[in-house]
Image (cartoon, grey):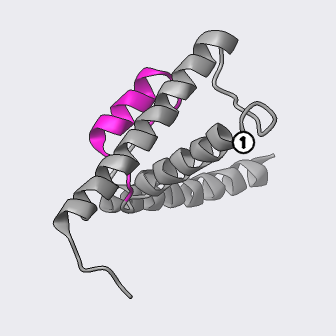
Amino acid sequence: MIPPFSYHSLFNDYNNREQRWLDRYNALNEFKRLHGHLHVTQKDSRDLNNWLKRQRYQIQRLEIGNNSTLTQEKIKMLKDIGLFDLNLTSKKDHNNNINSINTNNSSNSSNNSNINSNI
């Protein structure tokens, strides 16, 4: 039997997820305090290592302009402990950057062929 929908249970689920995220963030802070770095291996802590992989994946999504589960507050917290050097752009800005790089590369290759023909 499926239990009836309840906003109360939905709110509790959200709070539990947020609390778990904060617990792992605090564990990462403690790891950094003890070890002086943020490179958590599976051997150190499988749970924390997996959590870090998920945070990196969410950051990658943001960097290419996709949606992410990370809030601005969480991003700031992760940046503050030195986990990421974030360069977050919108999808439009990301595409413009890619087009700019491609344009520069094609003009550089034509410059290189002119240089090579002068040698």
Where in the figure is residue 107, as x and y percent of width and height? 55, 56
Placement of the N terminus among the 4 image quadrants:
bottom left
Q: Residue 75 lies in magenta, yes or no? A: yes
Q: Nearer the viewer, residue 24 or 16?
A: 16
Q: Residue 82 lies in magenta, yes or no? A: yes
Image height check: is 40 above or below 5?
A: above
Where in the figure is residue 10, as x and y percent of width and height? 26, 63
Which portion, as a residue range, is magenta? 68-87
Mark 1, residue position: 46
Relative placement, left or right, of 42 versus 47 is right
Q: Nearer the viewer, residue 31 or 69?
A: 31
The quadrant in which residue 90 appears is bottom left
Q: Is residue 87 visible?
A: no
How many labels, in total? 1
The quadrant in which residue 38 appears is top right
Q: Residue at x 63, y 38 (%)?
A: 48
Relative placement, left or right, of 57 versus 114 is left
Q: Residue at x 19, y 61 (%)?
A: 8
Where in the figure is residue 68, as x and y percent of width and height? 39, 57
Image height check: is 36 above or below 6?
A: above
Q: Residue at x 65, y 56 (%)?
A: 109
SS label for mark 1? helix
Kindly identify the amino acid type of the residue bearing the numbered disc 1.
Arg
Q: Is residue 34 visible?
A: yes
Q: Residue at x 51, y 23 (%)?
A: 82
Near mark 1 (Cα within 10 A), the count class, few <14, some 14-19 or many ≥20, is few
Q: Nearer the viewer, residue 19 or 90?
A: 19
